[in-house]
Image (cartoon, rainbow, N blue to C red):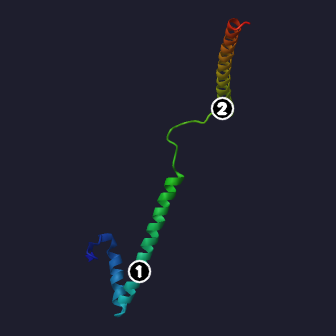
Amino acid sequence: MLHNSYRVPADMMHFCDQIAASSAGKNSTASGVSEQSFAEDLWQDTKFNVELKRDHIENNLLKSHDLSNRVTADVLHQYRYFLGRYKSLLLLFNLIFNYYSFLFCIIGEYQQANFKV
């Protein structure tokens, strides 16, 4: 048996019989019902497609996992890292200060040696 040019499976034949029996009892106004049915089907399909898209978007946004397998350091480790960076900055500034103070001392001694009056 064919329904809308598709073959109907054997286990669903009883649905076709029920549809045929219910449509046989209707009069010629069945065309108006089929248009309304088409509109309802179109609306339901549209609504279903919108809900399906929304579900896909929600699924993608809510279940996005971090795949980098990183573990955030606890507070003590973060503080230790901060102190390490701070300490290295202090050492760097200390080296720069000592270098420039050494240069100024040498320049000062050079000026005193060469420009004695």
Please determine whether, in this image, residue 77 is positioned above or below residue 5: above
Q: Is residue 22 left or right of residue 99?
A: left
Q: Nearer the viewer, residue 74 or 1?
A: 74
Q: Residue at x 34, y 76 (%)?
A: 14
Please determine whether, in this image, residue 44 is positioned above or below residue 68: below
Which residue in the structure is indicated by mark 2? 78
Q: Residue at x 52, y 46 (%)?
A: 65
State how far apart marks 1 and 2 are (Cα): 62 Å
Amino acid carrying mark 2 in the image: Gln
Please determine whether, in this image, residue 70 is positioned above or below residue 38: above
> Could you tell me which quadrant the C terminus lies in?
top right
Please determine whether, in this image, residue 31 is positioned above or below residue 72: below
Q: Secondary structure at mark 1?
A: helix
Q: Is residue 107 left or right of residue 29?
A: right
Kindly check if marks 1 and 2 are in contact, taking CB atoms under 8 A apart as contact.
no
Q: Residue at x 52, y 54 (%)?
A: 61
Q: Nearer the viewer, residue 108 or 65?
A: 108
Nearer the viewer's eye, disc 1 or disc 2?
2
Q: x, y (%) of residue 23? A: 35, 87
Amino acid carrying mark 1 in the image: Ala
Q: Is residue 32 left or right of residue 105?
A: left
Q: Secondary structure at mark 2?
A: helix
Which residue in the structure is indicated by mark 1? 39
Q: x, y (%) of residue 48? A: 45, 69
Disc on the earlier residue, 1 or 2: 1
Q: Which image quarter: residue 40?
A: bottom left
